[in-house]
Image: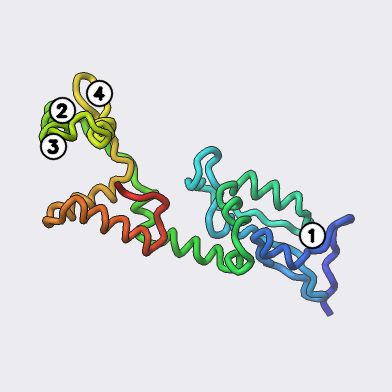
Amino acid sequence: MTKPLKAKAGATRFMHEHAVKYGLRIIHRDPATGEVVSVRCEFCAYLGREVKGKERQRAKTESKMTWTNNFRVDLYQAHLKGEHPSAWNKYQTSSFDEKVNFFVREVASKNTMLHHVHYNSKSIHFILNPDIVDVLICDMFFHPDDHGGVTQTATKNLFHQFEGNYRVIISNPMQFRLVVAQIARGTSFRQVVGIINDTKAITGTWDCYFH
């Protein structure tokens, strides 16, 4: 006959409603009593720990937080706030049903190509001759009536002076390549904007819109 596992002195029993409330999974029960012995942080298991100060980036550590015979809410909260702040904030605003499926949806989203399009690409820097920006883009591209207007000014502000030239930073290289490929096929600028924004809206993957 299997003997019950001894709990630590002063240990608190696991509250099953905390599994959904704090994103926990039961990983071990006492074989004799069925009492919960250990639980695991699902944020660690599915999303990884966040690099402090850099939302959405994840640390390379593979360690997963577990609690054994010590099921205190303050410990859960300290870990979640310290290691998974952005995901935990999002989780708390979710409904009960959304929390039940939260990790499945998050992993599914992160495994899509579109997630990597938006988040996982390093920026590209271009150094441009001043005439390309001043003459071709900011002068010839706009109708004379629009010179000095809001749109022309906003366009020029995308380029930053750099050692006598202009520098432009592409923060989303894959989206940039998609746009270039669409334009190369003969798609108009306005159509490209619509295609990209429709893709974002339908998939619900990206947080911002292309202008």
**Tag 3's secondary structure?**
loop
> Looking at the image, is mark 3 or mark 4 earlier in the sequence?
3
**Tag 1's secondary structure?**
loop
- The residue depicted at 15 percent of the width and 28 percent of the height is 134
- The residue depicted at 50 percent of the width and 61 percent of the height is 106
Alpha-carbon distance for marks 4 and 1? 60 Å
Kindly identify which residue carries mark 3.
143
Alpha-carbon distance for marks 2 and 4? 11 Å
| Proximity of marks 2 and 3: CB atoms separated by less than 8 Å | no
Kindly identify which residue carries mark 1.
69
> Looking at the image, is mark 2 or mark 1 earlier in the sequence?
1
Discs 4/1, front: 4
Q: Amino acid at mark 1?
A: Asn
Q: Is residue 71 left or right of residue 184?
A: right
Between 34 and 31, the one lying in front of the other is 34
Is the residue marked by circle 4 packed among few (<14), some (14-19), or many (20+) residues within 10 Å? few
- Residue 161 numbered mark, or none: 4
- The residue depicted at 28 percent of the width and 50 percent of the height is 174
Q: Is residue 35 left or right of residue 91?
A: right
